[in-house]
Amino acid sequence: MDHLLSRRDALRATALLGATSLLHPADSLAAAAAPGKGKTPPLAAPDQAAIDAALGKKGTYNEAQATHVVSLPRNDLNMRIKGEPVPIPFGFGGWMAIKHTLDGKSAMLMSDTVLLQEEVAPLMDAAHANGLEVGAVHNHFFYEEPRIFYMHVHGMGSPAELAQKFAATLKNSKLLPANQPASAAAPSAATGNNGTPAAPAAPTGKELFDLPALDKLVGAQGTVNGPTYKYTIGREDLQVVMMNTEMTAAIGLNSWAAFAGKQDDAHIAGDIAMLEGEVNPVIKALRAHKLEVVAVHNHMLFDQPRMVFLHYYGRGPAAQLAAGFRLALNQLGKSKPQHMPGTEH
């Protein structure tokens, strides 16, 4: 009967068998503490090169997490929130990541794609036509114009095969790097014979925000990306496995906060990665700082333990917004195993 087993059933069985010890939040904490757990084989240099070649863009290899990531910003969009322009790095940049399974026999692709409403169905059909699967479709924002949705696509196979399938999926969309508008040429250092001075460089997150003050509030160091400042924080207290692949910050298991605007009048948007028992404590923490909860949903399928993701948005002084993010992070790692009524044995 082996020949009757579908590829989907095989993937599901692999996920469940690979995560047998992680079916409970308490088990996940023990697994994270166990020595030798979660050592993912590295991606070889030829695999990294094959991924970059397929997507037509050089990615970044996170050696510590054995994950190759290619960013997919939607630079063709002009985004506004409540009528005010916001930069693409604030939360309108997608990504694709590939890493090996724990046994090194296969690899996983995970992605988050940024889509206009009318782009969702065509990309979904393209993903299925190219042998990939859809894990989630949802919003990340309120008040944005144009309306944006996010689709998570995943697949299993060799790194090169996955990258080729994903590139074929994006071929007729704006997400493919080759279909994005060309980057503006950097201004020349020389003024030339006409004596016209170069335009002043636009301020970056380093000039717009008090980075040391924000870092102290959050308890972490962020990254400047153009006019934004972003924190990305993994779940080091957990080992989460999906289809025999360890899910880490570089492949989407993270909490993040992005700041746009300026120190005294900022926007914040982000995501919190939670166990089910952490959802409502996080909601209460965010609301205590007047941050709006935009969505509560999944990003992954067959993940063990089951992870829930919450998106939020706020406006105000950056320090106040950062304190709300920190309070939400403080709720993580406290969740005890919970059972739905009627499931006790």
Image: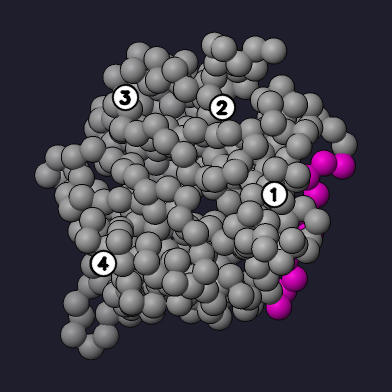
Confirm or deny contact between disc 3 and disc 1 (CB under 8 A). no
Label 3 element class: loop
User: What residue does disc 2 label?
Assistant: 275
Residue at x 25% of width, y 30% of height: 315
Q: Which range is magenta?
A: 36-46
Residue nearer the viewer, 214 or 200:
214
Of mark 3 and mark 1, the one earlier in the sequence is 1
Question: Disc 4 or 3, which lies upstream in sequence?
Answer: 4
Indicate whether 186 appears above or below 117.
below
Label 3 belongs to which residue?
A: 291
Please identify the quadrant where the N terminus is shown. bottom right
Who's the residue at 20% across and 80% down the image?
A: 195
Residue at 37% x, 49% y is: 137
Q: Is residue 66 left or right of residue 86?
A: right
Q: Main secondary structure of the magenta part?
A: loop
Residue 320: say if magenta.
no
Residue lying at 67% horizontally and 63% vertically, measured from the top left = 4
Circle 2 packing at 10 Å, graded few (<14), some (14-19), many (20+), is many
Mark 1 or mark 4: which comes first in sequence? 1
Q: CA distance from mark 1 to mark 2?
A: 22 Å
- What number is the disc on residue 276? none
Q: Badge 4: how crowded within 10 Å, few (<14), some, or many (20+)? A: few
Q: Residue 193: horizontal and vertical position, in percent? A: 23, 88
CB-based contact (under 8 Å), mark 4 and mark 3: no
Kind of element beneath mark 1: helix
Dot 3 or dot 2: first in sequence order is 2
Of the two numbered discs 1 and 2 in the rendering, the one whose residue sits closer to the viewer: 1
* 3D distance between C-alphas at marks 3 and 2: 20 Å
Inter-mark Cα distance, 1 to 4: 40 Å
As drawn, the label of residue 76 is 4
